[in-house]
Image: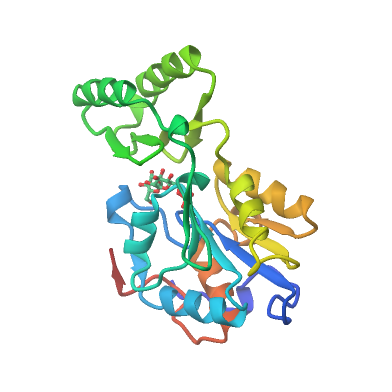
Amino acid sequence: MMLQRSHIAPPRPDILEKGAWALFLDLDGTLLDIAASPESVLVPKHLVEVLATLRNQLGGALAILSGRSLRTIDRLLHPLLISAAGEHGAVLRLPQGDVLEADASTMVPSHWRQMIHRAAEAWPGVLVEEKSHGLALHYRANPAFSVPVTALLEQFVESDPHFDILPALMARELRHRSINKGAALRRLMDNQTFRGRLPLFIGDDVTDEDAIAAAEQMGGIGLRVADAFAGEPARVRAWLSDLAAIDAPLAQQTARS
Ligand SMILES: O=P(O)(O)OC[C@H]1O[C@H](O[C@H]2O[C@H](CO)[C@@H](O)[C@H](O)[C@H]2O)[C@H](O)[C@@H](O)[C@@H]1O
């Protein structure tokens, strides 16, 4: 289905006004359509061009805030190396290229990881996604496993309250409580490239609520894909293309993984 530009929501402030705004974007479910597995997402070919153009127009003040690892963000958006928070903010790349990592004490312990892998071997369709600090267990291929997956992770967080379970789309993630996208947004806003601007964040999931709250607390705007873009990443992409004045196809089409 082709979307008409007249259907693009929502109204927006003058985001490109010099030095006024910084843009923060979630990846899965916001820029990318949800796919059957983390590895099978498709990246519309114009997306990278749109992001690169907007970054330049914003004087560098554009960042991706994702639950994905930084390495995966870079692979998906290749050849763009963009400011980003990976793993919900456990790993941050600043505009100047420096990479900051949360302390090793925030990493999911290796014996938990081993126990999770052992359990998942007996759960057909359950996928373990390893990240440097966190870990996600996906059950999209077999939703009945949401119950034992959650029960297993609950045992871990009950034994160590520094960690919590992040509900994700057809997945559960283990994450240190100190790590969230709101803190990542604030940390980036403290960087000279972002400082003095107002943040505008777009996200779709529970994990994005911290960044929405942070953006609003800083006087900016937090947009939920469900409310502002009818739940459709294609509309977010269209809105961004429009902002960048790039005449990109609006629906997802030729893509690369
Ligand atoms: O913060 P995000 O960029 O939105 O990342 C959140 C998680 O996204 C990925 O999982 C989700 O998307 C997959 C691909 O569409 C889908 O198959 C899965 O069911 C979703 O949960 C990613 O794999 C996670 O690491 C991210 O934390």
Residue beneath the point at 56% across and 30% down: 177
Q: Quadrant of residue 104?
A: top left
Position of the C terminus by quadrant: bottom left
Q: Is residue 113 visible?
A: yes
Position of the N terminus by quadrant: bottom left
**Image location (x, y in percent) of residue 91:** 46, 49
Q: Is residue 235 left or right of residue 139?
A: right
Viewer-nearest residue: 15 or 11: 15
Q: Is residue 154 left or right of residue 5?
A: left
23 up-or-down from 131: above or below: below
Residue beneath the point at 70% across and 75% down: 15
**Image location (x, y in percent) of residue 218:** 77, 55
Q: Is residue 174 visible?
A: no
91 up-or-down from 16: above or below: above
Q: Is residue 148 left or right of residue 202?
A: left
Viewer-nearest residue: 205 or 218: 218
Residue beneath the point at 42% across and 22% down: 150
21 up-or-down from 177: above or below: below
Tally the numbered discs. Answer: 0
